[in-house]
Image (tube, rainbow, N blue to C red):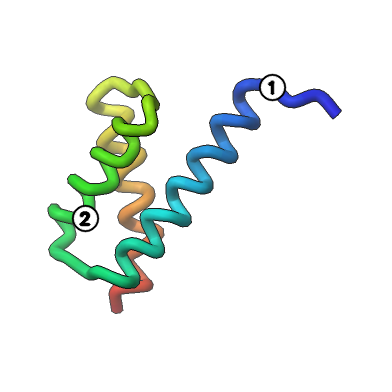
């Protein structure tokens, strides 16, 4: 089985999303604080995105987590 960079990135982002979801479940905060924490976690892991792509990814992750907060 051949592993390419895209698969590794997708797995990494999936893991980051699960980690972010666990963080939100155990320490709920305001939405803006949650978005800032997700963005910082992504940056700390060395994922380089322009600001528009970063905002889009953070919004997607935060939207996925929204039902968990209801």
- Viewer-proximal residue, 41 or 33? 41
On the image, the x and y values in percent for residue 6 come to 61, 25
- Viewer-proximal residue, 57 or 38? 38
Which residue is the extreme one toward the right? 1
Residue at the location (51% across, 47% down)? 15
- Marks 2 and 1 sit apart, C-alpha to C-alpha, by 31 Å
Q: Earlier in the sequence, mark 2 or mark 1?
A: 1
* Quarter the C terminus occupies: bottom left
Q: Are marks 2 and 1 in contact (CB under 8 Å)?
A: no
Query: What residue would you read off at disc 2?
Result: 34
Query: What residue would you read off at disc 1?
Result: 4
Which residue is the extreme one toward the bottom? 70
Vertical relation: 45 (above or below) 38: above
Residue at the location (28% across, 21% down)? 50
Q: Quadrant of residue 66?
A: bottom left
Residue at the location (31% across, 33% down)? 44
């Amino acid at each position: 089985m051949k592993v390419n960079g895209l698969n590794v990135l997708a797995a990494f982002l999936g893991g980051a999303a699960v980690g972010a979801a666990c963080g939100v479940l155990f320490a709920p905060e305001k939405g803006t604080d949650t978005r800032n924490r997700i963005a910082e976690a992504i940056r700390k892991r060395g994922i380089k995105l322009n600001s528009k792509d970063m905002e889009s990814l953070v919004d997607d992750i935060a939207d996925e987590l929204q039902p968990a907060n209801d």
